[in-house]
Image: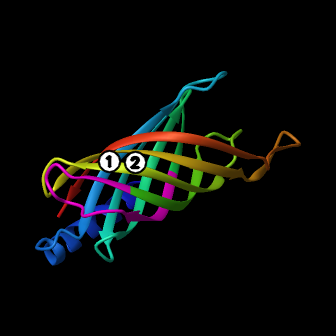
Amino acid sequence: MKLKLALVAAALAFSAGAHAADKRSSVSIFGNIIVPEEGDNIGTVFVSYGYLLTSALEIEGSIGQTFSGGFTNSILNGGVKYYFGAIGKAGGVVPYVKASIGRSTSNNAFSPDSSDYGAGAGVEFAMNESASTFIEGVYQSTKYDTIRVNGFNVGGNTSSQIVMQVGVKLRF
């Protein structure tokens, strides 16, 4: 996890000088809390780096950490966003759609790693040309690996959910 954070920090440092004039790069922090009908609440925090390929199309990579009942999962995601409007204008409200794929590793010997994909939509609210907040809803489908625990197969199932996420974004 420390290596992943170091790589993200290096990418941010490298790209900040190269693209500061046109604010094509961004860094975000966002998260969600899931309250299931049974079991422990699940909280997830992400840090992401994005780069605008065009005025409307952004690629994004994120790392995250999920916390639930004393266990954690590390998450690595990549995806794209398409904005329907001009971003980075103070007071602007810009809707977008997004798609992503990811991989999660668990520190719990009884919980398998997983792969996922997601699609969703959100709205970004620009406070000024560099800072914004956002809210999004994402449909996630997760496929769990099958592992052997005490002679029994665990995992191998697929789950789906809709997650609401909120965050802040800085463009540079």
Which residue is painted at 69% across and 47% down in the image? 112
- Identity, as a three-letter code, of the amino acid under mark 2: Phe
Marks 2 and 1 sit apart, C-alpha to C-alpha, by: 6 Å
Query: Taking 49 as reference, is 117 left or right?
Result: right
Determine whether 142 is above or below 66 in the image: below
The crowding category of the residue bearing disc 1, from other C-alpha atoms within 10 Å (few below 14, some 14 to 19, many at least 20), is: some
Determine whether 150 is above or below 100 in the image: above
Query: Taking 151 as reference, is 87 left or right?
Result: left
Q: Is residue 20 magenta?
A: no
Q: Is residue 80 magenta?
A: yes
Figure quadrant of the C terminus: bottom left
Q: Colour mode? A: rainbow
Query: Taking 7 as reference, is 1 left or right?
Result: right
Q: How many marks?
A: 2
Q: Where are the magenta residues, as a range?
A: 75-95
Which residue is painted at 27% across and 57% down in the image? 27
